[in-house]
Amino acid sequence: MNINDSIKSKAGITADKTQLEKPAAKPAQTAKGAATPVVAGESVTLSSLSAQVKSFEAEATAGVFDAEKVQAIKSAISSGQFKVDSEKVADGLIQTVKDLISAKK
């Protein structure tokens, strides 16, 4: 079984800029716990790339597995009816190794 990395297959990413204004000044916590004052009117500039990355993350985590199929397999394992097709497993492992070797070239 090959795992399709949908994030790598996306193309046409652009870097348009969008400005977001911070509404009010309040201290921000740093990694060491010290408060750093935030000045009112500061702006943060994010590219559209950040929105695309966020949507790719959502796509990658959504639908990663079929919950019904997982439940069916769990039931089959617990009842002793689950059979492993060793030839299919071996073929999948061999194909994965071939894919990894060809990707390194």
Image (spheres, helix red, strand yellow):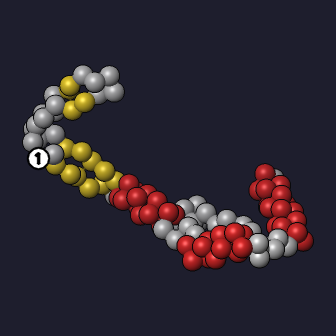
Residue at 90 percent across and 71 percent down: it is 87
Whole-percent x and y of residue 18?
26, 55
Q: Is residue 53 above or below residue 44?
A: below
Quarter that holds the N terminus: bottom right
Q: Is residue 17 visible?
A: yes
Say if residue 91 shows up in the picture. no
Left or right side of 47 for 94: right
Q: What amino acid type should be assigned to the residue bearing mark 1?
A: Pro
Residue drawn at x 27%, y 47% is 45
Give residue 36's position: percent from left, percent from top: 20, 26
**In the image shown, does 68 or 47 lie closer to the viewer?**
68
What number of labels is visible? 1
**For this view, does 39 lie left or right of residue 44?**
left
Residue at image coords 80%, 61% = 96
Between 71 and 12, the residue placed more toward the observer is 71
SS type, badge 1: loop
Relative to 27, does residue 98 appear above or below in the rendering? below
Residue 73 falls in which quadrant of the image? bottom right
Above/below status of 69 relative to 23 = below
What x and y, as percent, mark residue 10?
A: 53, 66
Q: Residue at x 24, y 22 (%)?
A: 34
Query: Residue 101 location, x and y as percent?
Result: 83, 55
List the residue tagged with mark 1.
Answer: 23
As rendered, which of 11 and 35 lies closer to the eye?
35
Q: Rate crowding at label 1 as few (under 14), some (14 to 19) or many (20 or more) other CA atoms within 10 Å.
A: few
